[in-house]
Amino acid sequence: MLPSELTTPQVTILTPTWNRRHLLPRLYDSLVAQQVPHGSFEWLVVDDGSTDGTSDWLATLIPGAPFPIRVIRQENGGKHRALNRAARELLSSWVLIVDSDDWLLPEAVHKILEETSSATLDVLAIIAPIEIEGLPPRRFRLSTRTITFAEWLDQSQVGDTSIIMRSSLLREHPFPEFEGEKFVAESSSFSRMFRRGGVQLSNAAITRGAYLEDGLSAQSLRLRVANPLGALFTYREHIKSNLSWRLALRSRINYYRFFEHAKSRGRDPENFGFRAGQPFRLLGWIAAKIDNRVK
């Protein structure tokens, strides 16, 4: 049963964005199309130093939008800093991160409100696959219990996901920020959030997206090489998460791989608290050399 009128939103649609003014109208239109009681959700946009008029365009929407819109503007620092900034401003109990190149499906917010209103206290996040244009839908093998980060990662064949999480998680598990780096994978914090469980899987369609040539997913390796301390942090957290032996091996090799990348960029990882013993060190060195040849 959904309330007829709300003063505090139940869910925040959170969009960190940088120079994506041309894509945001599609997301905005999908929010306008949601048929839910006024005030059920808000749109919180963090403009990460855009130079394409993003904030000015958003300001024109606020007076006539059928839902609250809040805009935070900051110097360009990367998506993870935008999320950290937003975490301090969240008013709702639940948050859904929707990137600027994604948009909501009809009935998405209604489904979110229904699922979150029936969530038990042990449910920290509800995760569903994102429908990608041009690709067949992918689905989870649903579990009757909440699962851990490691179990979720084991279903990686599902691809990108919509993650409806309790807002408190973003405040309690901020993304690491390294001076001079502007990227860290979101799994760096997800692995900490859900190490002991709390993930509920759902195959309810919420979000649709499209892969872009300049998107974060398409540039994953280049970004990790350019931001090796963030990559080191991510894989160190993965290693702590009781992964399957295949994923654990991959994470250890990647840890040493980006240890070498950090050194080659003149950033001694040990000055930032990262350590590297002998096991897998050679494999990581070889992987880093291959990366340098491919670039």
Image (cartoon, helix red, strand yellow):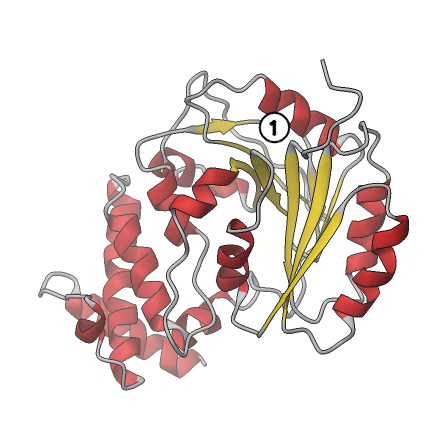
Between 285 and 57, which is closer to the camera in this rendering?
Answer: 57
Provide residue 62's location: percent of width, then percent of height: 83, 54
Q: Which quarter of the rendering shows the N terminus? A: top right
Residue located 30% across and 70% down the image = 258
Picture quadrant of residue 111: top right
Provide residue 265's location: percent of width, then percent of height: 31, 84
Between 266 and 257, which is closer to the camera in this rendering?
Answer: 266
Provide residue 96's location: percent of width, then percent of height: 61, 41
Total labels: the figure holds 1
SS class of the residue under badge 1? Answer: loop
> Is 73 displayed left or right of 225 in the figure?
right
- Residue under label 1, please give it: 203
Picture quadrant of residue 113: top right
Between 136 and 142, which is closer to the camera in this rendering?
Answer: 142
Q: Residue furthest left?
A: 278
Q: Mark 1, residues whose alpha carbon is within 10 Å: few (<14), some, or many (≥20)?
A: some
Between 205 and 42, which is closer to the camera in this rendering?
Answer: 42
> Is 7 displayed left or right of 26 in the figure?
left
Taking 70 as reference, is 91 above or below it? above
Residue located 16% across and 62% down the image = 280
> Is 287 displayed left or right of 154 in the figure?
left
Provide residue 254's location: percent of width, then percent of height: 29, 62
Taking 53 as reference, is 40 above or below it? above
> Is 143 displayed left or right of 135 in the figure?
left
Q: Which quarter of the rendering shows the C terminus? A: bottom left
Picture quadrant of residue 253: bottom left
Dot 1 amino acid type: Asn
